[in-house]
Image (cartoon, rainbow, N blue to C red):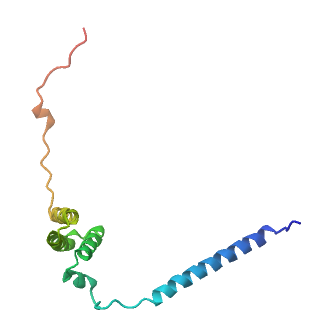
Amino acid sequence: MRIHFSKAWLVLLLSGLFAAAVALLSHKYVGLYLSQKPTPGATAGNPRQNVLGSNDPEALLAEANHLAWLFNWPEGEPLYARAEELFKEKGDKRDEIYARVGRIRAQSCGATWQPSPPIPLRSSCPEQPWPTLG
């Protein structure tokens, strides 16, 4: 026995199933978001100020990388430097080098690049006639 559906009914059925799946998933994630408890010790205000006083090198590095992605390298430079110090104290060589490279790159992004003046090519080459084919 075969059941025949018109294309309109099939589209309506599939879109209803899709809408139900989206509603169930979004309800799950909204519920998870609303059930989160505030982090103890977190203060309101500027989160960057909270990170600057932190002794957590991973948090400093994450915030510095965030600023770098926003092309705000000068703001990230002190965070990279502090993270580098903390990783050195911790003995984490890999992340210390990662923070150092970030700091160096942040310092270089503040520098201005001045191109050298163009060199005239004609004056540097001796004047020679074209060779003739014999």
Please provide percent x and percent y for residue 70. Answer: 30, 70
- Residue 34 higher or lower than 25, as above or below: below
Task: Specify whether 124 is left or right of 56.
Answer: left
Task: Specify whether 117 is left or right of 32.
Answer: left
Locate the N terminus by quadrant. bottom right
Depth check, front residue: 133 or 67:
67
Task: Specify whether 67 is left or right of 2.
Answer: left
Depth check, front residue: 119 or 47:
47
Which residue sits furthest front? Answer: 91
- Residue 42 higher or lower than 85, as above or below: below
Locate the C terminus by quadrant. top left
Task: Specify whether 52 is left or right of 19.
Answer: left
Q: How many labels sit on residues?
A: 0
- Residue 123 higher or lower than 48, as above or below: above
Rendered image quadrant of residue 61: bottom left
Residue sitting at x 47%, y 90%: 34
Please provide percent x and percent y for residue 85. Answer: 14, 71
Please provide percent x and percent y for residue 46. Answer: 27, 86
Please provide percent x and percent y for residue 14. Answer: 70, 72
Residue sitting at x 22%, y 65%: 95
Residue sitting at x 73%, y 70%: 11
Which residue sits furthest top? Answer: 134
Which residue sits furthest right? Answer: 1
Rendered image quadrant of residue 127: top left
Rendered image quadrant of residue 17: bottom right
